[in-house]
Amino acid sequence: MIFRKSTENELNSKEILNQVNRCKPEELENLLNQIETKIEESQYEDRDLLFAKTMTTSRLASMRSNDQAFI
C-alpha cells in the first residue's frame, strides 16, 4: 500500500479548493485552466484537484444554463 506524503502540492490543492468556493463568476474559466495545468503536471492522482475541476466545471455549466434561460 502506498501512502501519499503530505507535500507542498497538497497544500496548493487545498488552496485551490478554497479559491473555487470564493471565485467570482468571471474568473472561473481562468481558474479551470490553472487547475487543468496542475493536473497535467502532477505526478500522482490528486483527488482534491480533480474535485476542484469538477466543482469549477459545474459552476460554469450552471451559470451558462442560467444565462440561456433568460434568452
Image (cartoon, helix red, strand yellow):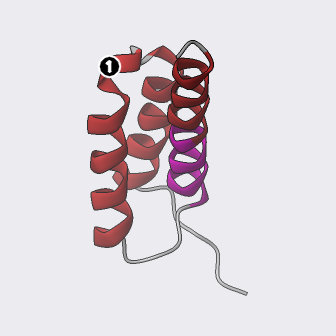
Q: Which residues are magenta?
A: 47-57
- Figure quadrant of residue 62: top right
In the rendered image, the vertical position of residue 63 relative to residue 44, given as above or below? above
Please report the residue visible at 60 percent of the width from the left and 59 percent of the height from the top: 47
Task: Report the label total.
Answer: 1
48 vs 39: above or below: above
The image quadrant where one finds the N terminus is: bottom right
Q: Is residue 65 left or right of 30 when viewed as pictured?
A: right
Residue occupying image coordinates x 60% and y 20%:
66
Front in this rendered view, residue 48 or 32: 32
Tag 1: residue type? Glu
Of residues 57 and 46, which is closer to you in this image?
Answer: 57
- Please state which of residues 42 and 7 is positioned toward the viewer in this rendering: 42
Q: Residue furthest bottom?
A: 1
- Crowd band around label 1 with a 10 angstrom C-alpha radius: few (<14), some (14–19), many (20+): few
Q: Is residue 15 above or below residue 8?
A: above
For residue 50: magenta? yes
Residue 26, percent from left and from top? 32, 19
Residue 2 vertical placement versus 29 (above, below): below
Secondary structure of residue under mark 1:
helix
- Residue drawn at the location 50% of the way across and 33% of the way down: 60
Magenta part mainly helix, strand or loop? helix
Q: Nearer the viewer, residue 41 or 7?
A: 41
Which residue position holds label 1?
A: 26
- Residue at 37 percent of width and 44 percent of height: 32
Give the percent coordinates (x, y) of residue 48.
Answer: 57, 50
The image position of residue 70, as x and y in percent, is 57, 12
Quarter of the figure with residue 42: bottom left
